[in-house]
């Protein structure tokens, strides 16, 4: 991870009439890191991401992505990013290969469909129709589509919600691999263990404001230093570890 900023958000504000969905959020994401945006439902996480992705207009503030100002260079920003939304809908009767070809045409790039699908464990499903995929497979395919234009930044909005333990752990490895290949990753999640394992730094958002930002380990150490005492002892493994040990870690083609 470098110390070169690739996303700069400065005093970002988004109002919906009398509702302040985003109320002066500021943070910086550095090249090559996995950055987590955490918070309860309605905290402003998704709205913030959608503004950065140029999918939603801001009320005020400044956003710079890959050196481009959002207000004047939204089209250039779109060429630099890949976006996986909370809910993605694709043409259900098209095959995965046909969908990838369509996206490649939109980006005006040439891709190797098998290579893209193999990165998410779907290399045998290229001829399958999207509607035939399981929920986990659809989620994996959604992430695959973010890689088509070889983006500098990938945005993943709650990518593992509703997935079984195997799919969740394997998606963690996929996200690490995306970063390993040089792409910056911005992720939202409600799973704190996920953020702790994946993220170099996290920003915790509450009521449209950033209330803490640091590495997961540093935030945990600050809490412990404040006198926090966990009521139940923490063991070296949890029930999910037991489940995976008994059932395996491989991708499942449900």
Image: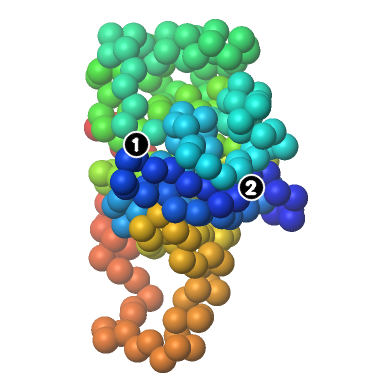
Spatial separation of the CA atoms under disc 1 and disc 2:
23 Å
Q: Which residue is mark 1?
A: 86
Specify which label sits upstream in the sequence, 1 or 2: 2
In the displayed structure, would residue 205 be above or below residue 78? below
Q: Nearer the viewer, residue 164 or 14?
A: 14
Q: Residue at x 32, y 85 (%)?
A: 230
- Which numbered dot is residue 142? none
Mark 1 neighbour density, 10 Å: few (under 14) some (14–19) many (20 or more): some
The x and y percentages for residue 123 are 45, 23
Q: In the rendered view, does 151 fall on the left or right side of 100?
A: right
- Residue 160 appears in view: no
Q: Which residue is mark 2?
A: 8
Among the 4 quarters of the image, the one containing residue 76: top right
The x and y percentages for residue 12 are 52, 47
Q: Quadrant of the N terminus?
A: bottom right
Q: How is the image coloured?
A: rainbow
């Amino acid at each position: 991870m470098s110390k070169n900023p690739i996303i700069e958000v400065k005093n970002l504000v988004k109002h919906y009439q009398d509702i302040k969905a985003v109320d002066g959020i500021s943070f910086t994401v550095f090249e090559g890191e996995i950055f987590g945006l955490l918070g309860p439902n309605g905290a402003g996480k998704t709205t913030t991401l959608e503004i950065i992705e140029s999918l939603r207009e801001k009320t005020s503030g400044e956003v710079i992505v890959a050196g481009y100002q959002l207000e004047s260079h939204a089209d250039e920003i779109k060429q630099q990013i890949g976006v996986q939304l909370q809910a993605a809908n694709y043409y259900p009767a098209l095959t995965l290969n046909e969908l990838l070809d369509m996206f490649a045409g939109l980006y005006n790039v040439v891709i190797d469909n098998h290579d893209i699908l193999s990165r998410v464990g779907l290399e045998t499903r290229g001829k399958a129709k999207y509607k035939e995929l399981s929920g986990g497979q659809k989620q994996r395919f959604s992430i695959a589509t973010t890689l088509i234009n070889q983006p500098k930044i990938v945005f993943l909005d709650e990518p593992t919600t509703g997935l079984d333990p195997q799919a969740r752990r394997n998606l963690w490895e996929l996200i690490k691999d995306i970063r390993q290949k040089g792409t910056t990753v911005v992720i939202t999640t409600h799973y704190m263990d996920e953020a702790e394992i994946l993220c170099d730094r996290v920003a915790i958002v509450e009521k449209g404001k950033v209330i803490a930002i640091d590495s997961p380990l540093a935030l945990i150490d600050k809490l412990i230093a404040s006198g926090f005492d966990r009521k139940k002892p923490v063991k070296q493994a949890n029930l999910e570890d037991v489940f995976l040990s008994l059932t395996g870690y491989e991708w499942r083609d449900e």
